[in-house]
Amino acid sequence: MIPAAFAYHRPSSLNEAINLLAKHGDEARVVAGGHSLIPMMKLRLAAPQHLVDLQDLAELRRIDSDGTMLVIGAMTTQQEILASGLLAGKCPILGDAAAQIADPQVRNCGTIGGNVANGDPGNDMPAVMLALDAIYRVTGPGGSRDIPARQFYQGTFVTALKEGEILQSIRIPTPVPGHGAAYEKQKRKIGDYATAAAAVVLTLQGGTCTAAAIALTNLGDTPLNAVAAAQALVGSKLDSVAVAAAVKQARAIARPASDGRGPADYRTHVAGIMVARAIAKAKARAA
Amino acid sequence: MQKMHVKLTVNGREVEALAEPRTLLIHFLREQLSLTGAHIGCDTSHCGACTIDLNGKSVKSCTVFVAQANGAKVTTIEGMAAADGTLHPLQEAFREHHGLQCGFCTPGMITRAWRLLQENPNPTEAEIRMGISGNLCRCTGYQNIVKAIRAAAERLQSTKEAAE
């Protein structure tokens, strides 16, 4: 499969990249790892006339902490997420999700920025970011702005990112004491999108859940923030009654397609199981 | 569309060529450099038959443009054996343990395993299976591939110890 022709640009700074996008408008696309865009280009579902490759922007390739926030550059690969000692210690749910994405070769190319910014409801990181209440810092011709992940996803491949803007970094509030989080995904095989998957973030104090967030992958047009499901856990000891209530609330908002991954009612059923498993794992990590 | 001038190091040799930016790296290797070892299987980044080593990492060359690889260091299956034709221990082990039947996936399997054994010189069976999870083989059921990689790891380890 051979994509349509394009002019190739490899800017050496974010500023230069922004200027290229401003110059070429909707004829230009940025490419990070390319493992979503290039397959679309090969199928000619995407045919940008200008491709702006971000690989030389070292400023977008970082994992660090500024005290209150974990900061992950948009060009950080899934493999770099998996290999990060800082993230394994502070925020292991990111490694849970990265390990479930594709395979080693694809994780060497695919970036966290591409995964969250593309707007594909099958991608795994967006639900994790909803649950963690992450902030996306984007930069455009007018400067930088912050968009909460919970306000970013508007529809399939439709996001709050405006033309000419580039995702720069993902900022995650540093987990508080008593925090535990986990991502559970069912898929048919390595490399598949989720039949259903759930991200759970909890805070426990003396065995009582004081805060919770739950988000779901590939069960609707966007990643789903399961607010009522999370609310069902708050104030409980995460006993079987509370977990069953959360599972019920999560299933109530799932709207999966019936496809090769199974009929919609099966996928909705699996969603509940993923929620229950992620709660159990998050609870164990919080303890 | 205008061609661009690309310069890569492929199997230790500097290569310069004119290519359209949209040329996929696998097509560039196979058609412009006549390095036909890496195969095109699924052409959709699933099967791993096109696996090569790009700047020290295993990647699927059907999903990389040659423009992105401009300036990069590439190793393919053709770069595994020594200059005198002596096979790499992984190639020997695949032969010894019958790690292939039709051979279509083999260049990708060996190139991936070559990088895996540099990342993790002494992998468990489970680590080998996860390490080659991006490479599909439709003949062997993987048993002999895993055995071959394990055997090559042991041989490389003992060679290294003997040298120390």
Image (cartoon, coloured by chain):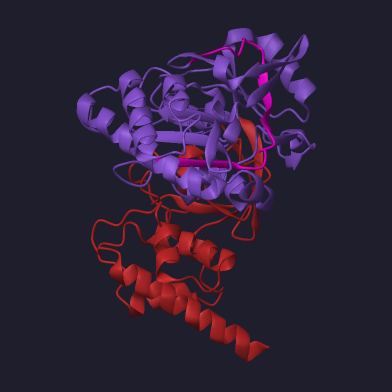
Write the residue at 54% across / 80% down. B156
The chain coloured red in the image: B
Write the residue at 43% across / 45% down. A280
What percent of the width, then of the height, locates residue A49?
Answer: 56, 16
Q: Nearer the viewer, residue A285 or B134?
A: A285
Q: Is residue A32 left or right of residue A56?
A: left
Residues rendered magenta in the picture? A158-184
In this rendering, the answer to whether A51 lies above or below B153 is above
Q: Quadrant of the N terminus of chain A?
A: top left
Question: In the rendered image, which quarter is residue A20 located in?
Answer: top right
What percent of the width, then of the height, locates residue B75?
Answer: 56, 57
Given the current orientation, which residue lies at the most extreme bottom position? B162
Q: Nearer the viewer, residue B49 or B33?
A: B49
What percent of the width, then of the height, locates residue B117?
Answer: 53, 68
Is residue A129 something that shows in the picture?
Answer: yes
What percent of the width, then of the height, locates residue B21?
Answer: 57, 30
Question: In the rendered image, which quarter is residue B124 located in?
Answer: bottom left
Q: Is residue A257 magenta?
A: no
In this rendering, the answer to whether B114 lies above or below A231 is below
Write the residue at 65% across / 11% down. A24
Q: Is residue A24 left or right of residue B135?
A: right
Question: In the rendered image, which quarter is residue A109 located in?
Answer: top right
Q: Is residue A183 magenta?
A: yes
The chain coloured purple in the image: A
In this rendering, the answer to whether A210 lies above or below A278 is above
Q: Is residue A258 left or right of residue B30?
A: left
